[in-house]
Amino acid sequence: MKRLTLLLTALVSLVGLTAPGRAEVPPGGTKAAFVMRWNGDWQVAGGLPEKLLLLSLQGLANRAGPQLYVVHPRDFQWEITEPLFEFYQRKHGVKFTELKTAEEALTLFARDAKGYVVWDPAVPATMNVALTIAGLDDALVVTAAQIPQVEQHGLKPVDDLRGRYTGQTDAQIYADAVTRYWARCTHESIMLMGGHAGAVRQPAVADWGVRQKMFFHDLSGNPARHPEEVALAQKLLSELQPGAIVFGWHSYAKDTEEQWTTLLSGYGLKMEGLHNLPNLSFNCQFGFTPGFKFTNNHHVARDAKLTAEAKVYLSFVQSDSIGIGVWTKPGRGKLPFAWQVTMNWTKFSPAALEYFHESATPNDYFIGGLSGPGYMYPNHIPADRFPLLMKEAREMMAILDEHVMEIMDNSAADGNVGNADLTQETVDRYYAAFPDVIGFINGYGPARTRDLRDTRPMISYDYYIDPRRPRAEVSADLNELIALNATRPYFLLVHVRESNDVNSLVEIVKQLDGPTEVVPLDVFLKLAASKKTYTTRHQDPEDPKHFKGYK
Amino acid sequence: MTRFLVCLLSSVLLSSVLAASPIEGRWRLDRTRSTALDGWHEWDLVLTVTGSRVSLQHDMKWIRTTLSATNTVDTAAPVEIPAFFRVEQRHMALYPAKGGTTAARAAWLDAGRTLRVEADTPIEISQGQATMRLYCEYRLLEGDNALLLIELHNTRPQPLVYRFTRVTETK
């Protein structure tokens, strides 16, 4: 082992001499960086401790420059790590050296840490407390079993959480962590490190939180089950800076996406998922390549006037962030498809956005969302925060050359079914905030908010394609909607869940009855503006609400 | 008098058939042998016969949400049901029309082993409102431990076929 360490130390020295090292990424030219290829083992009792150690290392190593990138297996939820790895080499001239083991990574980057902090897998919340400490005190996050390994690299204990929180509730643990650390953490963002819970955890976005010195937690947004945790979460959210971002994702064991997104929207904050979004500490350090400018595949000008014929117009949209799902599935480009872009990536993952634009086909059309400059539920955004947030959204849409805004408010929904409608007040605000869009779309599952003001329609999804639903039933569902909505033209907006593939949609379209046409979303909205065969409808106060919200 | 006696006899005979009808009870959807549900994970159907009235109770589950709704039909006369429950494909933007009333007709077929229910139900659609005509047969299968529901819509090109198994007390 010592011999290997010496060899690696020599290699580091050599790299240090020959590579540009830790400087800012120059616009062009060759940069040196390191890459690791991880497996899919995130078991707490298996691969998690080593990955957590490496994530804290990645966050610290990438502070001075983009040093360490991770490629995940093909079945990882974020499927873009491999294509983006290739993109960095091709477009940014990054020369990667592969590191095969954690030991190799420690040999290179342990110098970026001042010590280590010990977490206790038997007390899950200590992982998040340790990650908070890691960011604040430049520490690596280890279990007891990993102490000898990091001490071999000269690291000393910074803190040891074993025993400190044994027997305490998460509310008690995080309340103590707030007292100890919150004041020193950034208040521009916070890390909701939830997601997978129990035997498997997947904190792949931890590098970003460590790099940015965020407060890590997985406080519940469920007022019925965890009122103390909700109260503490509300305190933290209220103390964040206006327009701050909540990174990560809600805990699958405690609450729902709807609850947490409702909670943060009430403070005018933005959600940026997920808990396993990898490599942000690396990605944030690359801008757009010189001369690159977003050019969307518009099919109509903003002021174009189209006339709908007596037929059924369909348009397909995917809104689960283009970094996951359909983009890498077979068949993309065979049908007109709209993609909701995670607009905040212009700030912390520009290369990923450039990659998507570069690999877009003429049938791929990008739209803004989700609801604003991040994922939020607009029915709950405070009125005084709305204009500034939407100004930010307009600016990002301008950069991304987007003409359509997608809105989603599932605060009253039950998963992806139920009430996903916008109040009239919310609709009014959007029409006031986005005078230059072609139109708006709304929903995730189906919804029934519809409007048309001047030339800007607001259309909700009439159908959501569950990837598990047999294709014959999807065709039958669509044909039934076509039969019931018998007036022509009929505007049938379809949301395609992330893990569908376009090839199967091509086959579905062949099974549809009547005169149908699949059109790009901008064309769809222009046609919908030309002949209003849909009713105007907003959220009815009497419509059932699955979750009543916070007070 | 003769006519009265015939009617009485028929009524008694029918009642005795129905009273013994094994179609009553709790039935659980066999998802592996049924048309895929959309927006529901579980479905229990509870059939109760009281004279000419048949109540169809639907116990539904979706994630942690449970819902129970009952449609009561009458094999002797058409009924108007104010809050008719239809097992929807919930990823379609089709909703029960607010304040709508569903006209339903029911009849026993096949010597009381099949219940036919026909309903015209108002649906809210994105273009306003439409009527969906449903034709349902609840067929008791041989052995009386399985129930087949075949549901046709005038607007759907293919039937929905659901197979249920009887829930015994021990299940």
Image: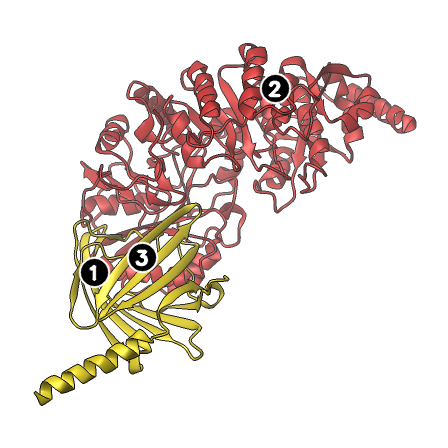
Chain colours: A red, B yellow
Identify the residue under disc 1.
B121
Question: Which of A257/B52 is in front?
Answer: B52
Q: Is residue A510 left or right of residue B103?
A: right
Query: Is A267 rendered above or below residue B96?
Result: above
State which quarter of the image contains the N terminus of chain B.
bottom left
CA distance separating discs 3 and 1? 29 Å
Q: Kindly report which numbered mark, 3 or 2, lies closer to the viewer in this rendering.
A: 2
Q: Nearer the viewer, residue A119 or A223?
A: A223
Q: Is residue A25 visible?
A: no
The residue labelled by disc 2 is: A132
In this rendering, is residue B4 above or below A491? below
Q: What amino acid is found at the position of numbered circle 1 in the picture?
A: Thr
The residue lying toward the viewer, choosing from A44 and B127, is A44
Image coords of residue A536 (percent x, y) = 18, 42
At 61% across and 21% down in the image, what residue appears? A129
Quadrant of the image occupied by residue A447: top left
Disc 2 residue type? Thr
Which chain is home to disc 1? B
**Left or right of A316: which side holds B117?**
left
Q: Residue at x 24, y 80 (%)?
A: B14
